[in-house]
Image: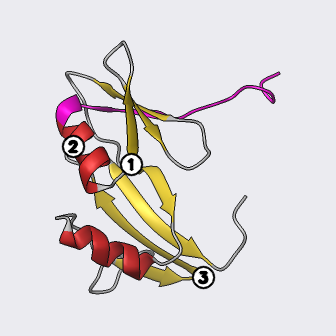
């Protein structure tokens, strides 16, 4: 029934102007403002990701957007220069190194937050992804 639908993802922020600055200037993504005050992130050839304002926004406790990259280390270094801070985890199932990188099971992934606390990641893998 939905196999031909052009699905897209969306999430909320409390301040659309801060989001526009972060996603456009800091992350360097192409952004389109639509007529309803919603940001459309144009990422590669995928469907746009919609970011919409919400007064009572609460950040999700999970990753809302993943960026596959050629090199996690190179990307982290470039984002740190732009002021992005990476998350550090030290639990039984998830341990990151000094840079904030989880290295395990053929994957490298690092998490960071946008100005509203939404969790994003950069990841590389030596396994084929979808």
At mark 3, the secondary structure is loop
- The answer to whether the residues at label 1 and label 2 have Cβ atoms under 8 Å apart is no
Q: Residue placed at 39% from the left, 20% from the top?
A: 34
Q: What residue is shown with label 1? A: 29
Name the spot of residue 116 as percent of width and height, x first. Answer: 21, 42
Above or below, 54 relative to 28:
above
Is residue 92 in view from this perspective?
A: no
Above or below, 21 relative to 52:
below
Q: Residue placed at 62% from the left, 46% from the top?
A: 45
Q: What residue is shown with label 2? A: 21
Residue 121 sits in quarter: bottom left
- The answer to whether the residues at label 1 and label 3 have Cβ atoms under 8 Å apart is no
Q: Is residue 3 magenta?
A: yes
Give the side of residue 123 with respect to residue 29, left or right.
right
Residue 122 sits in quarter: bottom left
Q: What residue is shown with label 3? A: 105
Name the spot of residue 18 as percent of width and height, x first. Answer: 18, 39
Q: Residue placed at 69% from the left, 64% from the top?
A: 129
């Amino acid at each position: 029934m939905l196999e031909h639908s052009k699905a897209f993802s969306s999430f909320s922020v409390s301040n659309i102007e801060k989001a526009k600055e972060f996603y456009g200037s800091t992350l360097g993504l192409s952004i389109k403002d639509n007529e309803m005050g919603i940001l459309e992130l144009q990422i590669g050839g995928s469907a746009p990701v919609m970011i919409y304002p919400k007064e009572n926004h609460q950040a999700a406790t999970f990753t809302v957007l993943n960026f596959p990259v050629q090199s996690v280390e190179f990307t982290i270094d470039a984002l740190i220069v732009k002021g992005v801070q990476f998350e550090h985890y030290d639990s039984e199932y998830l341990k990151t190194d000094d840079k904030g990188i989880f290295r395990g099971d053929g994957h490298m992934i690092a998490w960071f937050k946008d100005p509203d606390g939404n969790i994003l990641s950069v990841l590389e893998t030596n396994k084929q992804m979808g």
